[in-house]
Structure formats: structure tokens, C-alpha cells
Image (cartoon, rainbow, N blue to C red):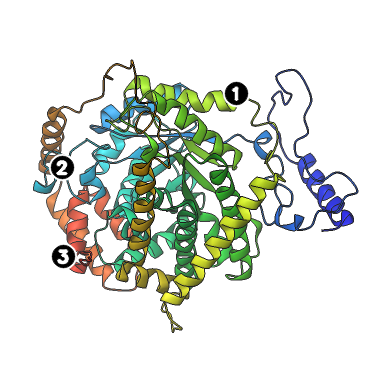
Amino acid sequence: MNADEIAAGRARWQARYDAARKRDADFTTLSGTTVQPVYGPPEGTAYPGFERIGWPGEFPYTRGLHPTGYRGRAWTIRQFAGFGNAQQTNERYKMILGAGGGGLSVAFDMPTLMGRDSDDPQALGEVGHCGVAVDSAADMEVLFDGIDLAGVTTSMTISGPAVPVFCMYLVAAERQGIDLSRLDGTLQTDIFKEYIAQKEWLFDPEPHLRLIGDLMEYCAAEIPRYKPLSVSGYHIREAGSTAAQELAYTLADGFGYVELGLSRGLDVNVFAPGLSFFFDAHLDFFEEIAKFRAARRIWARWLRDVYGATSEKALWLRFHTQTAGVSLTAQQPVNNVVRTAVEALAAVLGGTNSLHTNALDETLALPTDESAEIALRTQQVLMEEIGVTNVADPLGGSWYVEALTDAIEAEAEAIFARIRQLGGDGPHRIGPMTSGILRGIEDGWFTGHIAESAFTYQQALEKGDKKIVGVNCHTGTTAKELEILRISHEVELEQRRVLAERKAARDDAAVTAAVTRMVEVSRTGGNMIPPMLDAVRAEATLGEICDALRAEWGTYREPARF
């Protein structure tokens, strides 16, 4: 790019920056030096390839979505929390919000994630242990009691039974008297990553995609601020993928959901802004920053050039980040505070829109109040003390970071090409990337490559080529055993008792009629969200809704592979 083109770009950026709202904050260094909101090539100089870097708030968004960076709005502190019953988790949410958290992120227990009620025999011993138990809309009411759902953004990390759980959230909001169109937040709903990595599915892929398509249509029409899909790379990375695999598989899944929306006749400019992403922030500091920058650039280019998006917001890749749970160690767990801080800083320098920081004890148990507060304060130190919000994309133009960004992008593009090859030449019922993803799931292509990457890294650890402090080096310690949070068996007994009382008090005939109607609609081309909402309003439980659909659609079993 020549000097005149760079100067014109800087002028465009300056005009947009001047017109944008900025936070009332001190944007000087600790020593009082004034810093510029963005830096670029020296005036009057050319910079070959600068169009791939660009300016914040301008295509291809390598340097961020907004011209102001974090001067306009800092990232949302969204701490992931859930344990025991709805009342216990409600208390934790109020603690997080009271301590400065900007949004809520709901962690559900394993029975809920699998579409099972707390009184299901398969739920025995699991109720409330890895998240909060939610059996019906009544639990969702308790979960958000005293919290204005129209005034806080809410993320829910659940995919298999995401749609009925979302309906329970909507009904809880209705019972607060809230206009549903005001709701804002994110529902994960990403079923592709379940088959690829996390394994929390209910049905074959096609019925799940039908529900997701219905949800996309419903939210676009009725709840435009809410994002019905958070495409997740986090679980892919936690399963052992490389950074480039995480990026490529996640964006490929996102392209699959774009194809799903287009196959429904939806306008990409309307539904694409409702897609968001969820990435892992791992320990290789610069590689992670490069991954986030490449992600924005790839998404913008594909949405414009492949899928025909023309609106700016349709080209924006918005993402939440969580620090790497798999990087935490049971040995010398206090070291995890340092790991989490470094990972969080990488996410911030990569331009994350919201962030969760893991607690130091999460490799052992759910966080205690004290460890949860340390995790929250980690973000607040980054936000308030170290000057990282002063300059947009401060590492932009670094030879190392730009080379890493280009390398990760090139590797991701090669993976996209391979996935499309897996789908064949067509015809494609939904789209070519979707066909490739479905074939890759069926053939074990994704899981095989992730397993190979995980094995390679483990070998490097065993040989000592890769180091983990406290595990394979610097193992001496004076650390004492941590006090950890333990979930009492009484939680499960109480949840089952309350569920029985609610079932006894409801109108069973109304529940049966509503669930039957929902199944009838599933056999047509109608949208399933309205009848599912009616079933939830009648206090049908999550298990009853999911069991009715399992009876209609069957269940998915992963093929055995050796």
C-alpha cells in the first residue's frame, strides 16, 4: 500500500474516531505521557500489505471492530458461574454483579446439559455438581430473581437442549414483566462443536439444525438484540487442538450456520449480526493474539466475498473469550493465577468483546467465593491499572505478530479447503461447508486430527520439550492444600423434592396438550419455538420436552472408531 492510500485510511479512521463516543477516562501512561488512540506507519511512508492490517473499525477488521478500541467501550467482564441449585447460583450472580461484573454467563449441570431432569435415573449423583440444575421455567425464575433481565446481558453455555432452556429464560423474563425484544445476550446452541469435541448432543445433526434454524428465524423477528448462536472454539481447543485448528474448525462451523440461515431464506445482513463466537485464550501469548486478529479478518472476508453480506455489522466477528481451563494445574494451583492473567491479557490485546477468567481452583472443583473474586479482580486489574485500554491494537505492525497472524490465517484457509472437499461437489442441501462438516463428523475427521494434536503435545511434555511449572519442572513447593467448594448431596435431594412438588401442583392435562402440540409442529415445516414456549409456560420440564423429541427423532450415538 502506498503512502497516499495509507494517509487516506488514517483520515477515514480519524473521522470515525472523532464522531464516536469515548469513555470519560484518563488515557495517559502511568507517568502522565499522552498516547495516541492508534498507531500506524510513519506519515509519508509506504507499507507493503498494509491493507491486510488496516485501521481499527475498518475492513478487514484485523485491528478491531471499532475505531475507538477500548477507549469507546471496554470489554464486558462476564464471569461463568453456576453450581448447586438456582438459589445458590443466584447469590453468586449477585456477588459478581455487585463486585463490578458486567454480564452473566450461566453454567449448567450435566443432567441439564444432556436434557435430563434432576429426578432422571441418569442424573443420579450429578445434580448441581458442574453447574446449576434447571428443570423448568420455575428454576429459571429463581435463578434470576432480583436481577433485571432487561438490564444485564446473559450468556448461556448449552447446546444440545439449548432451545428449550432458552424458552425457559424467555418465560422467566415474561414473568418479570419484560418486553422480550429488549433482551440481550448470547445462547451457545452450537451443535457442530458437540460432535467435534464436547459430546453433549441429543439427536442426529439434522434435527438439531432444524431447531437452530427455527431459533435463528424467531430471534431475527422477535428478539433482534439477542444472539441465538455462539459458535464455540473453546471446547475444540480444550480437547487438544492447535490454535490454527481451533480457529479453522470454529469459523467453518460459523460458515455452516450462515449457510443454514441462507437455506431458510433469511437475509444474511439480518441474521449474521446474531452470530457470535467463543474462543479459548491459551498460554502461547503471541500466538493467541494473532489467532484473534486473524479470526476477524477471515470472517469479514468470507462473509463479504463468499456469502454476499454487505452491511458492516454482518462482517463483524464478535467474540467472547475464556482463559484456558486445560492450562490449569492441580499441582501448585496458585500458579494458575499467573497463567490466567497472561491468557486474559492475550485476549484483551487480541480485542475480545467479553471475557471470563478462570479461578485458580477450577482444576480441582467449582470455584469458592474467594477464588471467584480473585478471577474477577484479575480482569479489573487489567482494565483499570495497566494502560491496556489506551490504544487500539497496540501490537499492530509488530513483525512477529503480523507474521503469526498471516501464518495462522493461511493454515486456516488450507483447512477450510479440505473441509469443503470432504463435502464433495454437491448438490448440497444446506451448503458446501455444511456438507463437509457433516461428512467430517461422520468420518471422525475432526476428532482424529484433534487427537493427533493432543498426542503430539503430550509427547512433548513427556520428553520435557514443553514445560509446565510445578508439573515437569520446578516441582518443589511450600504450598498447602487448598480448601475447595464441595456440593452437598442434600442439593440433589432438595432439587428432586422441589421438582416433585412443582409437578404435583401443575395442570398435567395442559402440559400433555402443549407437549403433544409441539411434537405435531415438529412433523411440519412450522417454527417450533412458539409451541415450545407454550409447553414451558405450562411448566413442562426440560426432560419432558427433550424426551418427547427423543421419542420422535431418536438419539445420536457416535460410531465406534479405532
- Mark 2 vs 1, N-terminal side: 2
Q: Which residue position is annotated with label 2?
A: 118
Q: Earlier in the sequence, mark 2 or mark 3?
A: 2
Residue 384 circle label: 1
- When asked about the image quadrant of residue 125, the answer is top left
Residue 504, image x and y in percent? 10, 42
Q: Residue at x 44, y 62 (%)?
A: 253
Q: Residue at x 52, y 47 (%)?
A: 319
Residue nearest the observer in this picture, 391 or 105: 391
- Per the model, the C-alpha gap separating discs 2 and 3 is 19 Å
Label 2 vs label 1, nearer the camera: 1
Residues under numbered marks 2 and 3 in contact, where contact means CB atoms less than 8 Å apart: no
Q: Amino acid at mark 2?
A: Ser
Q: Which residue is mark 3?
A: 551
Q: Regarding mark 3 in the picture, which secondary structure is present there? A: helix
Query: Horizontally, is 487 left or right of 500 in the view?
Result: right
